[in-house]
Amino acid sequence: MCAMSLAPYGRLLRRPAVLRLVLVALVARIPHASLGVVVTLHVVGPLGRGYGAAGIVAAAMTLGMAVGAPWRGRLVDRLGLRRALAPSVVVEAAVWIAAPFLGFEALIGAAALAGVFMVPIFSVVRQSLAVLVPREEQRTAFALDSVCTELTFMLAPALAVLVATSWSTTAALVGVGVATVGAGVLLMWFDPPTRSVQVLERGGGAPPEPVSASVRASERVLSPSLLVVLLASSAASLVLNGTDVAIVAALVEWGQASSAGWMIALWAGGSVVGGLVYGAGRRSVHPLALVLALGLLTIPAAFAGTPMLLAVALVLAGVPCAPALSAITATLVTIVPEHRRGEVMGWNGSAMTVGAALGAPLCGLLIDRFGASAGFLAAGAIGAAVAGTGMVVLRAARRRAPRT
C-alpha cells in the first residue's frame, strides 16, 4: 500500500533531469535554510539584543527580498539563469562573511542588501519543474520539492546551531557566506531550464502543456486569482517565520538553546510527512484552506510546557506546511504565461517576504513582552485569521460573479 502511494514519486524521479534538479536543490538551499536561526542567535547572543531586535534584522532582509525578487525574476526571464545569478552570488556572500563584524544598525542595512540580491534558488527550482514536468504530474513535483525543502530545513538549522553553539555565531555566519558561493556556482553549473524551448533544445523530451489560451493571450498578469495566491503566500510565511523565532525563544527560556536545531528538524519532519501524503494523493486543496490549517495547528504549541510537548506540537504543526507551499506553486504556474513565470515567482517571493517581515518582528516583540508562548499564539492566530478572511471574501466574490 505504501509502495502504491509513493508510485507517483517513482515515475517523477525516473526523469533524469528532474532527479538531478532535486539533488542540486537539496544542496544549494542549505545556506538560506540556515540564515534564520543563525541571525537570531547572533543578534540575541554576541550583539546582546532581544528577539524583537532579531526580528527587525530578519524584517530588513525580507523587505530587501520583497524589493529584489521580482527584479531578479525578470532578469532570469530575460538574461538566462547564469547571467542573472552572478551578481547575487557575489553580493550575498560578501554580506554574510562581513556580517559578524558589523554592529546592530549596520547589520540591518547589510541584511536588507543581502535580501535584494538573494540567490533565487527556491523560485528557480520551481520555475524549472514547471517546464520539465507535464501538467498532470506537477502537483506531485511541487509536493516533492516542498518535501525536499523541508529536508534541507531539517539538516541546515541543526548544523548551523551546532556550529554557532560549539564555536561561535561568527563561524556560522562566515560559513553561510562561503556556502552561498558554493551554492551559486553549483546552480550556475547545472543551469536548469526555465523555459520550454530550453527543454527541447537540450533533448529533454516534450515540454509540459502550456497555460490556457486565454491566459497566454493576455499580458495582464495581475488578477484576482493571483492576488488570492499571493495572500496565501504571505499568511503562510507569517506563520512559519513567527514560529521559527518562537521555537528558539522557547528553548532559550528552558536553557536548551542547543536543541533548537533538532526541534526545527522535528517541525520540518511533520511537513515532510504531510507533503508526501498530499503529493501522492489525487485531490488538490485550495492554498488558503491549507494555510488556514497551518495557522490553526500552530496554536497548540503555545500551550506546550515542556520541550517534549513542544516537539509533539511542532510535528503536528508542520503537517500542513509542505502541502500549503506546494499548492501555492502549483496554482501559480497554471494562471500565468510561461514567459512571465520568473517575474511572478518573484512576486510570490515578495509576498512571502512581506509575511515574514510582519511575522518575525511582531512575534519577536510579543515574545520579549509575554514570553515564547505568545509568539506561537500570535503566529498561528494571525495566519489563520488572514487565510480564513481570504476564503470568506473569495467565496463571496464567486457568489456575486455572473453565471454563464
Image (cartoon, rainbow, N blue to C red):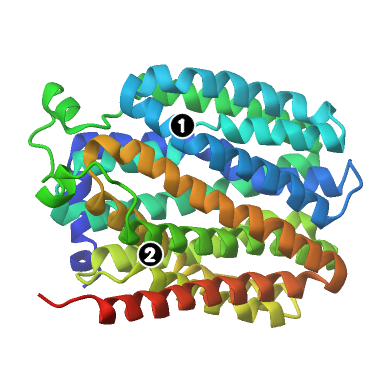
Q: Where is residue 212 in the image (x, y as percent from the top left)?
A: 13, 51
Question: Which residue sits furthest right?
Answer: 48
Q: Locate the C terminus and report the quarter of the image it occupies.
A: bottom left
The quarter holding residue 125 reads top left
Nearest the camera: 367 or 251? 367
Mark 1 residue element: helix
Q: Is residue 117 left or right of residue 349?
A: right
Residue 256 in picture, x, y percent from top left = 80, 61
- Where 71 sits versus 86, above or below? below
Residue 318 picture location, percent across and down: 51, 67
Horizontal relation, residue 268 to residue 372: left or right: left
> Label 2: few (<14), some or many (≥20) within 10 Å?
many
**Circle 1 sits on which residue?**
71
The residue lying at 64 percent from left, 64 percent from top is 243
Would you name the residue on which mark 2 appears?
Answer: 323
Number of marks drawn = 2
The answer to whether residue 218 is above or below residue 1 is above
Q: Is residue 340 left or right of residue 288?
A: left
Residue at screen point 41% across, 49% down: 148
Identity of the amino acid at label 1? Trp
Q: What element carries label 2?
A: helix
Q: What residue type is labelled 2?
A: Pro
